[in-house]
Image (spheres, rainbow, N blue to C red):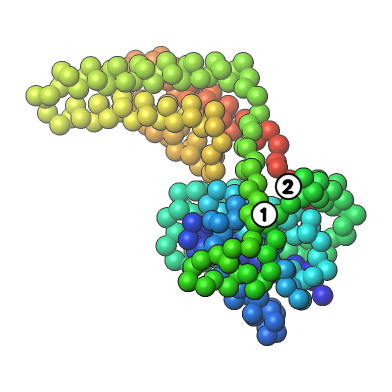
Amino acid sequence: MSMILFACVVRVRDGLPLSASTDFYHTQDFLECRRRLKTLALRLAQYPGRGSAEGRDFNIHFSSLRDVACMAICSRQCPAAMAFCFLETVWWEFTASYDTTCIGLASRPYAFLEFDNIIQKVKWHFNHVSSIQMESSLEKIQEELDFQPPVVLTLEDTDVANGIMNGHTQIHLEPAPNFRMEPVTALGVLSLILNIMCAALNLIRGIHLAEHSLQVAHEEIGNILAFLIPFIACIFQCYLYLFYSPARPQKVLLLLLLICLGNVYLHGLRNVWQILFHVAVAFLSSYQILTRQLQEKQSDCGV
């Protein structure tokens, strides 16, 4: 029998299920455990970090970070380190696949049901790959659990009475891991300086044109926007280079497209060399953003 039986991804603030694995177990005890998992999902904001709810035949493990939590129903034989390693892997896969804005705007249950394929793939891996192949990853997770034990509940504790906790559960706060980016390179600093320069030039020209075009026809509005939109895009490029953000390639492509289209539109107000300079800086910044990755993944669990 598999040790990891069921997994789901939920939104922490309201317990909204975002995705879940296909359920092949229909015993009465398992269905009761599913019911208690749904109840616990509504209270995850009270248990930041990692936690476990222990039962007679099954355990519920959960791991939350920011507004996304992963939960799993495992057999009693499943080691806690393996369960949390699995949950952390699913969390990384989910947050890499979906933007935080999309997650926050989700209004219906299982809005990302297609992620079930990834959950099933990771679940199969953990259920069928020997622990020896994941030894280093499991040892790392076990050290974290020894240093910062997860919240321990019983399945009976997950039942809510008038929305009030029963009072005898201790809550251990787990510090959220930081998204550490690779060190800034000299070429990256140069791209930031050039990007700020281009942003300043766009802003100055846009404001100057707006001040002298209040009584002019609507054609000038397009020129003003063609300066101000690349200005905003340059600022966002600087942000994407300095800080981690999900769906970075899509955002980089959009910003690059806006800058290129804006400068092409300005042909006549700018000469060819000026346009080439702005476009070249945009390409350099885009390259630097895409090549500067997270310094290290918080957990590499063999998937």
> Residue 28 at x, y = what percent?
68, 85
Kindly give the residue lying farthest to the right in the view shown. Answer: 132
Res 73 quadrant in image: bottom right
Tags 2 and 1 touching, CB below 8 Å? yes
* Up/down of 1 relative to 224, above or below: below
Can residue 264 be seen in this snapshot? no
Going 65% across and 56% down the picture, which residue do you hit?
170
User: Mark 1 belongs to which amino acid?
Assistant: Arg
| Mark 1 surroundings: few (<14), some (14-19) or many (≥20) residues within 10 A | many
* Up/down of 144 relative to 264, above or below: below
| Disc on res. 148 | 2
Q: Nearer the viewer, residue 135 or 40?
A: 40
For disc 1, the marked residue is 50
Going 66% across and 72% down the picture, which residue do you hit?
155
Going 62% across and 59% down the picture, which residue do you hit?
70
Q: Nearer the viewer, residue 198 or 261?
A: 198
Going 63% across and 63% down the picture, which residue do you hit?
168
Res 289 quadrant in image: top right
Q: Nearer the viewer, mark 2 or mark 1?
A: 2
